[in-house]
Amino acid sequence: MQDLLYFSQQLINGLTIGSAYALIAIGYTMVYGIIGMINFAHGEIYMIGAYTALIAITGLTALGAAWLPLILIVALVCAMIVSSSMGWAVERVAYRPVRGRHRLIPLISAIGMSIFLQNYVHLAQGSRNIGFPDLIEGGFQFGSDDAFQMSLSYMQITIFITTLICMTALSLFISRSRTGRACRAVSQDLGMASLLGIDTNRIISATFIIGAALAAVAGLLLGMYYGSIDPLFGFIAGLKAFTAAVLGGIGSIPGAMLGGLILGVSESMTSGYLSGEYKDVVSFGLLILILLFKPTGLLGKPEVEKI
Amino acid sequence: MAANNYKHALFCAIVTLIISFPILGLNLEAEGVKITVTGAETSTHIAILLAAVVVFVFQAFRDSFMGALGKLPKLNPLVNKKPMEQSKRVKLESWIMTGLVVLALFWPFFVSRGSVDLATLVLIYIMLALGLNVVVGLAGLLDLGYVAFYAVGAYTFALLSEYLGASFWVALPAGALLAALFGLVLGFPVLRLRGDYLAIVTLGFGEIIRILLNNWTNLTGGPNGIGGIPDPTLFGMEFGRRVKEEGNTSFHETFGIAYSGEHKVIFLYLIALVLAVITALVIRRFMRMPVGRAWEALREDEIAARSLGLSRTAVKLSAFTIGAFFAGFAGTVFASKQGFISPESFVFLESAIILAIVVLGGMGSQLGVILAAIAVTILPELAREFSEYRMLIFGAAMVLMMVWRPQGMLPMRRIHIKLKKQE
Amino acid sequence: MTISVKKLVTAVSASVALMAAGHAAAEIKIGVAGPITGPVAQYGDMQFSGTRMAIKRINEAGGVMGEKLVAVEYDDVCDPKQAVTVANRLVNDGVRYVVGHLCSSSTQPASDIYEDEGILMITPASTSPEVTSRGYELIFRTIGLDSMQGPVAGDYIASQNPEKVAVIHDKQQYGEGIATAVRDTLKDKGIEVAMFEGVTAGNKDFSSLITKLKQADVDYVYFGGYHPELGLILRQAEQANLDAVFMGPEGVGNNDINTIAGEAAEGLLVTLPPSFDEKEENQELVKDFEAANEDPSGPFVLTSYSAVKLIADGIEAADSKDPFDVAAALRSGTFETPIGTVEYDEAGDMKSFEFVVFEWHSDGSKTPVN
């Protein structure tokens, strides 16, 4: 019983982080699916989302707002607007001019953008860790008082539900809406889509905006869940999310979800049953293994090399 | 069309405001134990507004700007000039290189110790950048974990001296060979991956190596690092004030001159210089050998190269291994210069800096890479007040370089031979 | 007329030059090396404000052997590579006394150069035992060692008769060093150390670790490391209803831990050097700090102050400006400083340096525990 509770607790921990990874991974997977580049700066967009949300929350609290849902929604909207604008601007400035050149060039441009944004926030907001207020407190407890108690906090539930809502909305958007259909067409064949009258530039911009908005949601949620943010925390989260995207099969949205959850659970099981020191080794090792044996990921389509 | 332009310009200006105002204009500050938001200084807000106005004006009149820019006479005289004749160019480049080396050889005797030490660091970066240049610039494999091989070189020396008492001269080939071996072993499975996957996997490997070095406390001292790494000796002569190892003599006593710390610094500098020159020459040879041509062929068009019978794995692996070898060289010199190493010297940022040097210098070009290494290491030292902005400028430079001049400052020109006309 | 103007100008410039030369000769340069930029710049600020105040006060009191002290400040970003560059520049600039560096991993490679070049170094903040364990002649410190701080924490935990203790660290030189010392002390006292594990610095998710701590059912958790990680651990532990007392070294004892952990910081135990700024005999000094709008309460402010004072007193005691003579004087004498009476042993460590256990409160204040 004890062991089962312990296992479930680690599973919940892993799933929580995993769903947040999945939200960030969407940005990678959609961009890769459409223009075939790794948007290295995506982790920074997520970090900027978290900063904006914290600024909004602190500002609103200072102004006297007290109703929690209002604060959260305003913070979420602010974060999404700023992150989306950032995503759009990054694409315009750093990626569009180099689109279609040799593969390495957009990638290096993206790494440069990532370094730039990290230091932009670092210079503007300082490098210290800033505490995020604890807005959603409390939770459920399972198990007897005198032994190991499993806890499921309201914050964790919020993360699950929000991720689920975002994923459902995104899937519906991609499968039903006009823009979504255009997105799919562009990711199938960019040249053909533009011949058929789809404004490919607009669709690519839309992809960046959607990815950035979801990253902002993750920024707010994880900021609250972890409890502090700093300018460097986007980079490692971005790396993890990218790993999740590759794991699930890059280009596939359900794949990103699955990859995120697997990565989150494997990380928490490593720290739970082995040692936290080797958490990152396991996630990078997992990535390398997947790429070696199934380069298209779990749910990805096999890619045919075009000549 | 014009109305559309203004609409777009307005949109861009608004986006500029949105992305700069919350982050730049509102500062999160810790006041006692509470976090508060305060507005930044007025000058910052004015700057943000100005930026938005500039973006608006530029976007609104973009077409006319671009038109005017196109009509301007080219400022850069080189652009209009015909590319220099092949043989002349090669000659010029080798003259410049020789000049640089001669200058570098005599220079330390006239400048201060701090400059010599900094120059040694520059030479280490030159070695690293030349090595990475083989992998990224010539073979077109984006390696984001290059620092791992650098760490292997440095740690080989540190561990050999710690446990076996090995000297610099033993450790130098050992470090380089072990790094090359790592390159070979790590490279073998990952090299079938395509460009960007390869980048991520190498990044992962780099991190794994660093984490292992940090966690393997029994062997590597973990975060405590390894200290007491000896300085290089000259035929058994040590450069320290006191002789540390039995059987050695000290340099200043042998020659009967007064002890000076400068000797050691200059000696290390000269070793680094010789190694950097060797690195440059060896890689130059490789570039002209069939394997060097194969690297470039594979970079330009993998499918075509394969259909001509080049073994993808062998070619890529050779580039990877040779790159790793020189990183091991650089690592050994670094360990010797520092006397103490710990995993925090081998983080991802270090890989990014080396990559930036290669990119800024012009991928593939040796002279460009050398100049870029000098610039990237020295500029922050000269402008220390701006050192906070160093990485910001770094990132921006990488983006701008890719947008405007992806071939780098001094792009590589392929060496080719023309058949002489028959008289 | 013109001639006289010319003469005047010549005379003035000559005298200025003379004054400058005379000034330059009657100066003792004190190099101060620490992080001005970078992630731990806030600790660097403490170091610089301490040394500046010390130099100002010593100069106001007439200087050392009639000569003024002049600070030369260097930024090493707490990066080992830059620390070596800085050390070489110091040699270059003819500095013979250094207060620094801050991070042990910078101090260690830099001290090799100082020892070789005959420069006297006093670190006000590096606690790694390695720094002074290499038989160097010119390397001192004005702070205790990890191996001194650890046992204080270990003894305190042991005195509370806990059933099980977990020791966590951040896999960095400072954190792991102290954590190891705490673990060894606890083991010697026969207390069960149920867990000894590292976390990755910069990590933010500690839920798995906390679940593990809950499962192990520990009463005390010692964390070796800095405030960003411990702050999050405290907060996430409270959310997960982990019922244990947390304890950390001086690296966690600053107000930033309150902004991160909030209410969860209440009751945290911290080993700190005693609050020198609350000592009776230091009140005049504290007033000077406050007049200059500086905060004397940081853990490294007065240790840095004392480092400068020790150099000055050492020069006076040796009656020589040769660093080797000064080092000998420091080893043989007894000196009064704001951090108490200082006597050095052969290694260059203070013979006694006290650490005191404080209880931290959620409003950022602290009270001594006894």
Image (tube, coloured by chain):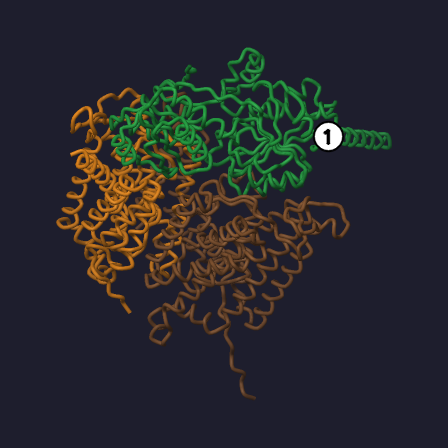
Report the chain shown in orange.
A
Position of B92 with respect to A180 (left or right) is right
- Chain hosting mark 1: C
Q: Nearer the viewer, residue B364 or B188?
A: B188
Q: State the image coordinates of residue B149 (x, y, percent, origin top left).
A: 46, 55
Give residue B35's quadrant in the image: top left
> Of the residues shown, which amino acid type is indicated by label 1?
Lys
Report the chain shown in green.
C
Identity of the residue furthest to the top in this view: C280
* Residue B12 visible in rendering: no
Q: Nearer the viewer, residue C51 or B205?
A: B205
Q: Which residue is mark 1?
A: C321
Give residue C186's quadrant in the image: top left
- Label 1 sits on a secondary structure element that is loop
Q: State the image coordinates of residue C103 (x, y, percent, origin top left).
A: 51, 35
Q: State the image coordinates of residue C54 (x, y, percent, origin top left).
A: 61, 22
Name the quarter where the C terminus of chain C is drawn: top left
Give residue C263's quadrant in the image: top left
Name the quarter where the N terminus of chain C is drawn: top right
Query: Residue at the location (63% across, 38% down)?
Result: C114
Residue A231, above or below C239: below
Q: How many marks?
A: 1
Residue C139, above or below C220: below
Q: Nearer the viewer, residue C16 or C340?
A: C340
* Residue C198 visible in rendering: yes
Residue B72, above or below A7: below
Report the chain shown in brown.
B
Q: State the image coordinates of residue C209 (x, y, percent, origin top left).
A: 30, 35
